Image: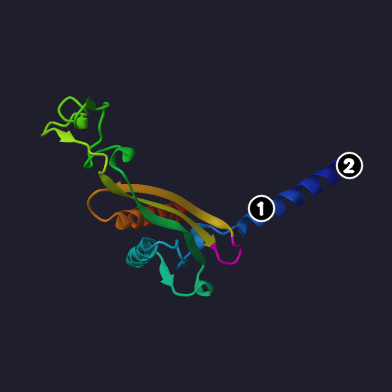
């Protein structure tokens, strides 16, 4: 009876190990198709910037048809204008303490109100910065298994927010691929 139980357990373990070897990993992905990342005009721009960065990396080949790919990068990405205070700063500066509230000008930021040592800034409530968001998944073509995912949110009042979203996503993908490759 014990011998029979040992054989059954051994067969189960062998079956589990064999199945585990067929699970797709980031290591096996060489060719990537980048699917549509949303309906915003900025979504297409982020998609193209990701494509360029992946091509320059040398680790992945970007293909034009999903059937040619080992995996498909999919998800959603875009931009929106948000109040500067909602992203932790005015003019790119993070404010440490609540502002002084002037009855005429409203919230006032300056020396002693968040650590800024230059001139006093009056926040008008209309100051907006770009916030870029991306939620990405890499789906293995044959099994349709999710083998990688990443979420990024960046904000900027200068520079390219679309470029920052693409940069962070590609850097993370390359970092995780390098780890999967064992290098």
Q: Position of residue 5 (x, y in %)?
A: 83, 44
What residue is shown with label 1? 17
In this rendering, the answer to whether 2 lies above or below 140 is: above
140 or 42, which lies in front? 42
Could you tell me which residue is drawn at 16 percent across and 30 percent down? 110
What residue is shown with label 2? 1
Examine the rendering and report whether any part of residue 25 can be seen: yes
Could you tell me which residue is drawn at 56 percent across and 59 percent down? 24
* Extent of the magenta region: 140-144
128 or 164, which lies in front? 128
**How many discs appear?**
2
> Could you say which disc has been placed on residue 139 in the image?
none
Could you tell me which residue is drawn at 50 percent across and 65 percent down? 72
Colour scheme used in the picture? Answer: rainbow
Q: Position of residue 56 (x, y in %)?
A: 32, 66
Name the residue furthest right: 1
Q: Quadrant of the C terminus?
A: bottom left
Q: Quadrant of the N terminus?
A: top right
Q: Position of residue 109 (x, y in %)?
A: 19, 31
Location of residue 42 by image quarter? bottom left
Q: Is 62 on the left-hand or right-hand side of 96? A: right
Q: Answer yes or no: do the residues labelled 2 and 1 have beta carbons within 8 Å?
A: no
Q: Secondary structure at mark 1?
A: helix
């Amino acid at each position: 009876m014990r011998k029979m139980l040992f054989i059954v357990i051994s067969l189960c373990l062998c079956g589990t190990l064999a199945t585990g070897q067929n699970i797709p990993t980031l290591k096996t992905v060489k060719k990537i198709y980048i699917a549509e990342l949303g309906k915003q005009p900025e979504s297409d721009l982020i998609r193209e910037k990701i494509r360029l960065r992946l091509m320059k990396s040398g680790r992945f080949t970007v293909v034009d048809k999903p059937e040619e790919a080992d995996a498909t990068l999919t998800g959603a990405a875009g931009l929106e204008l948000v109040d500067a205070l909602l992203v932790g700063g005015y003019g790119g500066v993070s404010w440490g303490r609540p502002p002084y509230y002037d009855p005429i000008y409203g919230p006032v930021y300056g020396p002693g109100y968040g650590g800024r040592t230059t001139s006093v800034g009056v926040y008008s409530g209309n100051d907006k910065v770009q916030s870029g968001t991306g939620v990405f998944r890499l789906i293995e073509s044959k099994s349709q298994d999710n083998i990688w995912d990443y979420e990024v949110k960046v904000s900027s009042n200068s520079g390219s927010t679309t470029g920052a979203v693409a940069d962070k996503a590609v850097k993370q993908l390359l970092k995780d691929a390098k780890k999967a490759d064992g290098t």
